[in-house]
Image (spheres, rainbow, N blue to C red):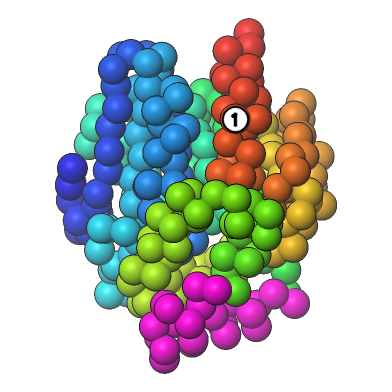
């Protein structure tokens, strides 16, 4: 399904067999909504599950102008408005976790619970050059040269060897990401920093990290949990895409978290 959000044609999928509370999933840099297929199937009987392609990813168009993580959070707010969702449980992975943090800060009354996976509250100064290099490489050479090293960071060797059926859709989504969309997102991530604001978050929060995540070390996720009062922190035996690599464990954690009394 497509809807025009802030002047951008945006793809989304809504699964509301259960007609329950809204549950929104936000994907990683270089991904698309398909990364959540398995989890959406798990939760759709009890929740109204929303997945969408972030600006410049999947089948959502890239904007001609640069954008920030705050702009991407604004896209989500406009999408929820268009679909008539006053509030939602929010789950974000990697870049999606940054968008989820920003959205929660900008629209606190619209977030029932917050789940952040494999993410950080800021891109540190020493990482700025890396983001610039990735943006430049995508613009110069396209996405394919970035795929092998990215998959190595995202998933452990054992998982990649044992589950090609899970790896291939992730590889395809990364390879077909719009180079300009990817580059602009890299620049948005480069400039992201909400560390000084995290204490303002008051909703129930679950933070999940992958033990073998080299791109976003578990300490970065732990720092988010430490800054949010009452946040729960969980470490999974995975690399950067922990909700994919440990899907059953992540689903169980999320289910328990969503059902706990407020």
Residue 114 image position (x, y, % from top left):
58, 32
Range of the magenta residues? 126-148
- Residue under label 1, please give it: 248
Residue depicted at 31% across the width and 35% down the height: 80
Q: Is the magenta stretch mostly helix, strand or loop?
A: helix
The single residue placed furthest to the front in the displayed view is 162
Asked whether, in this view, residue 36 is left or right of residue 245, the answer is: left
- Closest to the observer, 214 or 189: 214
**Image: 61 above or below 94:** below
Residue 190 image position (x, y, % from top left):
59, 71
Q: In which quarter of the image is residue 176?
A: bottom left
Q: Quadrant of residue 237?
A: top right
Residue depicted at 50% across the width and 73% down the height: 147
Residue depicted at 65% across the width and 30% down the height: 249
Q: Is residue 76 magenta?
A: no
- Closest to the observer, 14 or 202: 14
- Closest to the observer, 240 or 110: 240
- Closest to the observer, 74 or 90: 90
Residue 158 image position (x, y, % from top left):
68, 54
The single residue placed furthest to the top in the displayed view is 261
């Amino acid at each position: 399904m497509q809807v025009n959000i802030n002047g951008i044609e945006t793809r989304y999928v809504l699964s509301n067999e259960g007609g329950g509370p809204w549950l929104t999933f936000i994907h990683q840099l270089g991904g698309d909504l398909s990364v959540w297929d398995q989890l959406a199937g798990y939760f759709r009987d009890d929740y109204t599950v929303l997945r969408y392609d972030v600006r410049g990813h999947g089948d959502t168009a890239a904007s001609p102008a640069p954008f920030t993580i705050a702009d991407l959070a604004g896209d989500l707010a406009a999408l929820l408005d268009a679909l008539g969702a006053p509030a939602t449980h929010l789950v974000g992975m990697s870049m999606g976790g940054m968008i989820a943090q920003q959205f929660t800060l900008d629209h606190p009354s619209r977030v029932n619970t917050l789940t952040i996976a494999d993410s950080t509250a800021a891109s540190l100064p020493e990482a700025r050059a890396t983001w610039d290099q990735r943006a430049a490489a995508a613009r110069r050479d396209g996405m394919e040269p970035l795929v092998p090293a990215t998959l190595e960071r995202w998933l452990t060797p054992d998982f990649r060897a044992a589950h090609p059926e899970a790896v291939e859709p992730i590889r395809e989504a990364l390879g077909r990401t719009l180079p300009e969309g990817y580059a602009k997102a890299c620049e948005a991530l480069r400039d992201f920093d909400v560390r000084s604001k995290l204490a303002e978050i008051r909703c129930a929060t679950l933070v999940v990290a992958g033990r073998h995540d080299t791109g976003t070390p578990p300490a970065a996720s732990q720092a988010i949990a430490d800054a949010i009062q009452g946040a729960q922190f969980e470490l999974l035996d995975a690399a950067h895409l922990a909700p994919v690599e440990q899907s059953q464990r992540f689903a169980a954690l999320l289910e328990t978290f969503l059902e706990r009394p407020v």
